[in-house]
Image (cartoon, helix red, strand yellow):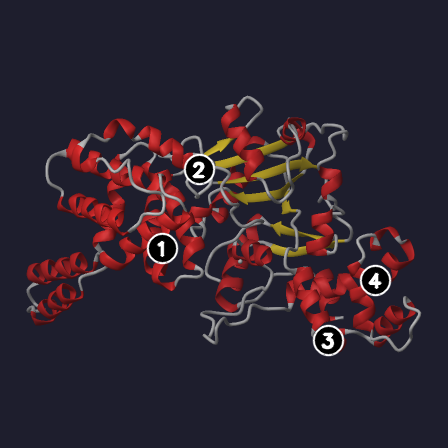
Amino acid sequence: MASETITETAPPESPQGTGGLGFMERFSRLWHGYVGGGRSDLSDLKPGLPESDLMRVQAQMEACLEGLGGEVSARQRAAALGRAYTGLNEEGRARFLHLLAAEYGPDRDAALAAMAAYQSTNPEDGTALARAAHRVRQALQPPRVRLMTQFNALPEGVHFLVDMRAELLRLSRRDPALKALQGELKDLLTNWFDVGFLNLERLTWRSPAAVLEKIIAYEAVHRIDSWQDLKNRLDSDRRLYAFFHPRMPEEPLIFVQVALVGGISDSIQALLDEEAPVLDPTKADTAIFYSISNAQRGLAGISFGNFLIKRVVQELSTEFPNLKTFATLSPIPGFRAWLDARLAGEGIEALLTNAERKTLKALGKDWEEAPSTMLAEVLGHSDWLSDEATAAAVKPLLQRLAARYLYLEKRSPRDGVPAEGPPTALDPVAHFHLTNGARLERLNWMADTSTNGLTRSAGMMVNYLYKLNEIEKNHESYTGQGRIPVSSAIRNLAEG
């Protein structure tokens, strides 16, 4: 989970939607009072934005960039443009964004002239050099960035831009013409969502219902099935923390769920059991981070997770001085995909020991069948875990392959472009925690027996250990040299 930081899950498709529903309707209602009649009124645009309507939108963009009139006029024009976008269908929004990308990029001639002036400036004249450099920066700034910035002045304008980027992320995957616009909006949001501007809040059962509803909707690692399930996750031996932005006070950006327990947990079903007794949190010695979820798809690639974990560790250490261990109980989301690809390409044979080949062949009736075929057949049945003999036979093999996947398999360069920096862990969640300074600590067999856990991770989960006095050293070792801090148990299993 590339240059983007990906946590336990990728950001979900927003329940509000980036498709003209939900919050798009809310934006339209919020901005209704800002829009006057006349040239600023684009309320009668057709949803698909045909050519005649596209020309009207372009005229409104030009008016926004001209900036005539005072603050009230500027807000009116921006609100009319924003409302126009919210009323379009998917085709119309794509045409709107294409117009923005194609017609309002940097002025190449102006940029070249400014750079030439900079080059000809006397390097000993500091004032003139600074002035010339400023002109270069201004010339390189696309007008569309100034246009997008104008939404800041509107109620929930920042949220509108977050949802617009979610749309751009989806569209730019198949349309390279939108990539530059998407990147520029990401740069804007990165500045606006600097971690120094964010508020860390602990959510409890007394938190606003509207916020708790969003936690239920955004949680994707371990689905919240009911309000009772959520109440259990907010009990006295649990903690849920989220980052909020002052301009989006009711929208969690990223949140983490923590269980206060005795010892490192090895089963998510046991951890989330609503019938389990509540532990006195003052007697807990371990904090288990069991779910970290990005909540805004439009903020993908803007890293909050590492700051969130460190802040939460500080909060918990202050509240509960008896906590000695900070660890995760994390999924291995890429394991089955990696394994299935190796099985399909017969690339698994070279990784098997002779003993493992014999074990796999013994599971089938046809001794001529390849071991990789037998393993694929076993895992292809949803009830393979319920057959004790089969589960016991494949357990050592799957554990060893999972350890190898986590510790030895590295991310490959994409599209033939050499990777920048040292090699990184192939598994996205592993990369996230290792980047944050954690150690690959323990592999847990049948830690997640849900359908999702079996499908993605063959039922296994892993503990990443955050040892406070080793976090910085581990971070530097991994990000600088590509070395994965690992326990001897996992290293021996992977290399065995």
State which quarter of the image contains the C terminus.
Answer: bottom right
Mark 1 or 2: in front is: 2
Quarter of the rendering containing residue 491: bottom right
Question: How far separated are the C-alphas under marks 1 and 2?
Answer: 21 Å
Q: CA distance from mark 3 to mark 2?
A: 46 Å
- Is there CB contact under 8 Å for labels 1 and 4? no
Are dots 1 and 3 in contact, CB under 8 Å?
no
Q: Amino acid at mark 2?
A: Leu
Task: Identify the mark at residue 182; answer none if there is no mark.
Answer: 1
Looking at the picture, which amino acid does disc 1 mark? Answer: Gln
Query: Whole-percent x and y of residue 408?
Result: 64, 69
Circle 3 or circle 2, nearest the eye: 2
* Element under disc 2: loop
Picture coordinates of residue 293, whole percent (x, y): 55, 44
Q: Nearer the viewer, residue 439 or 370?
A: 370
Q: Is residue 289 left or right of residue 346?
A: left
Q: Which mark is residue 346?
A: 3
Q: CA distance from mark 3 to mark 4?
A: 18 Å
Residue 394 - label:
4
**Relative to 441, is 104 on the left or the right?**
left
**Amino acid type, label 4:** Val
- The residue where tag 2 is placed is 21
Residue depicted at 59% across the width and 33% down the height: 239
**In this picture, is 211 found above or below 167?**
above
Q: Is residue 469 left or right of residue 59?
A: right
Say if residue 316 shows up in the picture: no
